[in-house]
Image: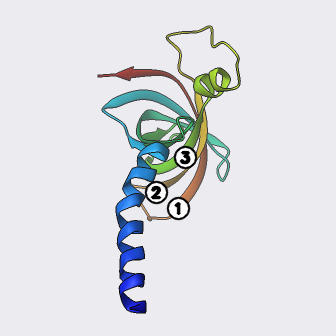
Amino acid sequence: MFRNLIVALFAVLVMSVPAMAADLFTLNGLNVSGDTLYLPSSGSFAVGIGSDIATIKEVLTVRGVLVSEVTKDQDNKAGLGIGLNLAKLINMVGGSWLAGNLNASIGATALINLDGDAHVEPALYVSLINWRY
C-alpha cells in the first residue's frame, strides 16, 4: 500500500514538472547579435556574435557566444553564459523601452580558448542589437 502511494506521487510529480517548466523556461528560435565582451583577466576586449539559446522567466537568457580577442594575439573563444534582457526588465517593472529596434542585454559568460590551452576565462558582455529570423 505504502509503495503504491509513493509510486503514484512520483508519477504525478514526473507528469507535472514539464507543465511547470513551460512557464519558467522556453527555448528560443534562431537569433544572432553582435557582442562586445570585457575580459577582466587580461584587461582586454573581445568582439563576435552570440545567440540566445533559452529564456528563463522572460528576463534571464542563456547565451552562447563565439568571439575573437581584440589584441595582437586574436585568440578565438567560445562560451556560454547568462544575461539580463534590459528591455524586457524595464517593461516588466512598468517602464517604457523607447528604442524599439535595440534589445539591450548584459551578462556574464565563461569562455574557453579555442586556439591554445583550454582554460575557462570569465567575461562580461553587452549586446545591443538582435536579429531574429
Give the quarter of the figure containing the C terminus: top left
Nearer to the camera, 79 or 89: 89
Q: Residue at x 60, y 22 (%)?
A: 87
| Residue 131 locus on image (x, y percent) | 38, 20
Q: Earlier in the sequence, mark 3 or mark 1?
A: 3
Q: Residue at x 45, y 46 (%)?
A: 25
Q: Residue at x 62, y 8 (%)?
A: 98
Closest to the camera, between mark 3 and mark 2, is 3
Which residue has dot 1 on it?
120
Q: Within the image, what quadrant is residue 7 found in? A: bottom left
Circle 2 Cα neighbour tier, 10 Å, few/some/many (<14 / 14–19 / ≥20): some
Numbered label attached to residue 50? none
| Residue 54 locus on image (x, y percent) | 42, 43
Q: Secondary structure at mark 1?
A: strand
Q: Within the image, what quadrant is residue 91 found in? A: top right
Which residue has dot 2 on it?
112
Q: Residue at x 37, y 76 (%)?
A: 8
Circle 1 Cα neighbour tier, 10 Å, few/some/many (<14 / 14–19 / ≥20): some
| Residue 36 locus on image (x, y percent) | 55, 32
Amino acid on which the number 3 mark rests in the picture:
Ile
Which residue has dot 3 on it?
82
Contact (CB < 8 A) between labels 3 and 1?
no
Q: Earlier in the sequence, mark 3 or mark 2?
A: 3
Amino acid on which the number 1 mark rests in the picture:
Val
